[in-house]
Amino acid sequence: MTFGMMNQSKNHLKKTLLLLIFFISSSVHALDLNKMELPELLHLFSQQKQSTVDFKEEKHAFFLDQPIMSSGHLQFAAPNKLYKFITKPEKISQKVDGNILEINNNNEIHSINLDEHPEFSVILRAIISLLSGDLTALKKDFKIKFEDKSSSWSLFLVPHDSYVSGYIESINMFGAKNKLSKIIVTEPNADRSITYLSNHR
Amino acid sequence: MPSLQRTSITVHFIWLSLLALSLIYLSSYLRVVSDVTQFMPDNHQNKNVQLLLDELQQGNTARLLILGIKGESSKKIASLSRKLKSELDKNKTFSLIHNGQQVISSKDFISGQYKTLYDYRYLLATNKSFSEKALSASLKQRLSELRSGLNIFKHSLSSDPQNQFANYLWNLTERGNSTHHHGVWFNKEKNTALLLVELNLTNFNLDQQQSAIETIQTTINRLSNDKNVQVDITGAASMAVKTRAAIQSTSKWLSSIALILLSLLFWWAYRSLRLFFLATLPLISAIFAALTITNILFAQVHGIIIAFGITLLGVCLDYPVHLFSHHTKLRSPQETILSIWPTLRLGVITTALAYLAMLGTGFSGLSQLSVFAVTGLIVSLLVTRWIVPLWLQTNFIQPKHHYLLYLSQLKLNFNSKLFIGFLIIFICSLIIANNYDSIWSKNISDLSPIPEHAKKLDKELRNSVGAPDVNHVFLLKDKNSELLLQRTEALNNKLYPLIKNKLVSNIFSVTDFIPSQKQQRLYQNQLPDSDSLNNNLKMALANLPFKQEFFKPFIDDIEKSKNLNPLDVKNVLATPIGKHLQQDLFFKNNEWVSIIRLTGVKSESALTDWMALQTDVQPYYLNLRQATSSLMSDYQETALYRLLLGSFVIGLILLTVRSRLRAGIILLPIILAVLLSISIHVLLGTQLTLFHILALLLIVGIGLDYSLFFDRSWISAEDYHQRLHGIFISASSTLISFGILGFSDIPVLSALGQTVTFGVLGCFVLTLVFNIKNYEKA
């Protein structure tokens, strides 16, 4: 064999390898076409500056025979306004503006500073961070596990803060594209609240 | 000449060493006190008034500051209030910061610092009903809270479903008066967030108080970083600091303006600034001596005395002025001072004796002032006599003043003078008689050196934060704390009609939070038995999603409460709520004291009428304003009486050294000037205080000097010009310094300034008018 032949055969191998790599990589890419990463999802959310959605909530607790039910609608306005209007079975409104949570329960108004009550704020902050597409904020508060199946995704959040995790064990959020459909908040004693969201507008 | 030099050296040596000794003494021993109570009589009959005043001035109440933050949107201000609280909470200078936030977690009830109180909740607060209806209402409320997400009391839900303990704490810190906005205390009308801050200071050191206040100020500036944000701070400590600052700044601008104007006056009068500085030597020596002697005799000097006394000694400037005006190049300064010495001496001795009349009244303030003034007057006389002439140049030339010629050529016959005298007496008597009832101030705060705007701010913030009115309290004392609480409870019960009849909006009694052991037993006995409670709870829970067994801790706790030994006062005061109650229940002079406070008194007269019918309630009632106003009247009456006594002494002395007619001519213009000064105040609507009376004494002293100098025999027109010049310059310098003082925003100083300005003007004009005759004779 001459040196020239050797060179030729090496070149051929190289071409074949490159071709192989190209095919593998493109097929992987083709498999992933309908899936999203968390940043992409959050980017999608960040496009929508305002949204309204109906909700139905069930609170399950060890001290309850039956869950506490309530329903109404949620309103979000970027970057950090979240209003929750419970209309049934009684009228209660919750307004988060920045770090102030104002609860109007039968015209009795309570203001709560969220910085002082992280146990309340953690759920609200998770929702606001998601809806506003703020990855940094999410990462700051939670350990994140994101799963995306072709038609839906789930976001599993566990609070970093040990004080907060004494109140909230995890927050599970489910959705499809930029539509949130379910939130499950689990407490350390297994008490849960499940919120179903529908009629996005 | 050598003997003169030797005398000069000796005199200077004595003077300078005494001055140095006084400086050394003052720098380490001078103790200045500043509260009004110390100016009050030592042995007041009503010990309760004294006790309450002490508590207000030096007790826990005095440690409280009220803050108002404003100048931005309500949201920003509320957030600033929270941030400020959390910052100040870290600082040991502050023992309690309250801004209306409810930050206690229900976790603290069960295992934290509130545990003892929580365990005793059914013994400490008036129990709620345990009926089915009441329980059902409470549970529905809790359900609604859970639904709203407001489950702050989640941890106490199973053991306290009625929120008995949370309400107990809420009532304690809110006292039912303040309003909330954005979760903090707020005055919505004024868009102001309100905070109560308690200083953790064991003594009332002004510097420490000032640095605490500055800490608050700088913390707010740092947190807000916004020029629009303003903070108003009030409270006893803030008042004391503000007063000191006001006195300092007043004395600064006052002395600079006075310095400029007086040096101009001296330049005009004598063409010499050197003489001006020479004239201040007796004054400065007088101030040091007066401070030293007063501090030695009383172990302290009241701030009011210093401010008042120093200005009062301003009259000492007159003595060297008389010396300068009488001096000519024809004689030595020693000869000049010897020529006017008898007159000067008589003037000082009579004035000093008048001040001595203020001694021994039982009013420590008056005694201090008396010592201060007498020492100052005598020392300045001595310095004028022995030191000033040594520095006076023999050959100094006085400029010719044409006004003297004009003044000395005035002519007035006896009848005109008589007419003027009677006219003044007639008009003044008419004015004074017509307003006799309103001449004297009855408000103790008129005596305090606190600037008017600071008092107004204090009242405003106090009202907004719902601080109880100190003017309507019931005070009870007992050596036994349990008996005291029982008596307080009994009295408190008798006061309920006041709320029912809407005479007051609220009554705050410490027994609502620390009931007597007897009352705690009563609460215990009212607790339901387990069976009926279980039964009621079961019925209440029908149609509610709660599990019945969840509330077992509630049933158990009530059962446990029945077997608790009641808490005693000290146990409760040692808990975190103790801080909130120590102004209403405290141990003082070997006795326990409790105070019941009324808030929102609708009508004073209706309250007084109601009280008149309640013979068992009335003895404990204390209206601080009323009590102190009678104290003020006593004080003023005593001072006035002593003023008359002092004037009588002056008259008596004059009668022994002068003929009756001459004594009359000397005294009449002074009496008229005093009458004029009072009448002008009455016409201006100023109510006279103790300080006005003391200022009148100053007028008498100054006027006496003028009169005595006019009264001196004289040998030539030039001689007459000299005394006229001396009196004119004295009067001008007094008018300048006291005129400026009249504009001070410290009530004491402006009272002094205005009174003396009117009085001295009157004295000068009237002594001149009444002495014109002497010149005609010549």
Image (cartoon, coloured by chain):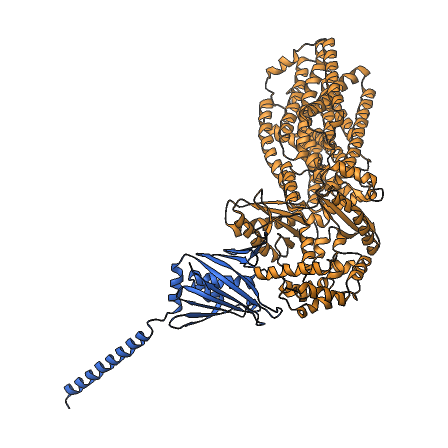
Chain colours: A blue, B orange
Which one is in front, B86 or B179? B179
Percent coordinates x, y for residue B678 in the rendering: 72, 24
Res. A30 image quadrant: bottom left
Figure check: B406 above or below B519: above
- Which corner quadrant holds the N terminus of chain B? top right
Res. B546 image quadrant: bottom right
Res. A104 image quadrant: bottom right
Q: From this viewpoint, is residue B740 visible?
A: yes
Q: From this viewpoint, is residue B286 visible?
A: no
Q: Is residue A44 left or right of residue B326?
A: left
Q: Is residue A93 left or right of residue B768?
A: left
Figure check: B473 above or below B275: below
- Which corner quadrant holds the C terminus of chain B? top right
Percent coordinates x, y for residue B661 in the rendering: 80, 15
Number of disc labels: 0
Residue at the bottom extreme of this rendering: A1
**Residue at 31% across / 74% down in the picture?**
A29
Percent coordinates x, y for residue B577 in the rendering: 70, 57
Which one is in front, A194 or A190? A194
Percent coordinates x, y for residue B130 in the rendering: 73, 60
Figure check: B568 above or below B690: below
Which one is in front, A124 or A143? A124
Figure check: B750 above or below B101: above
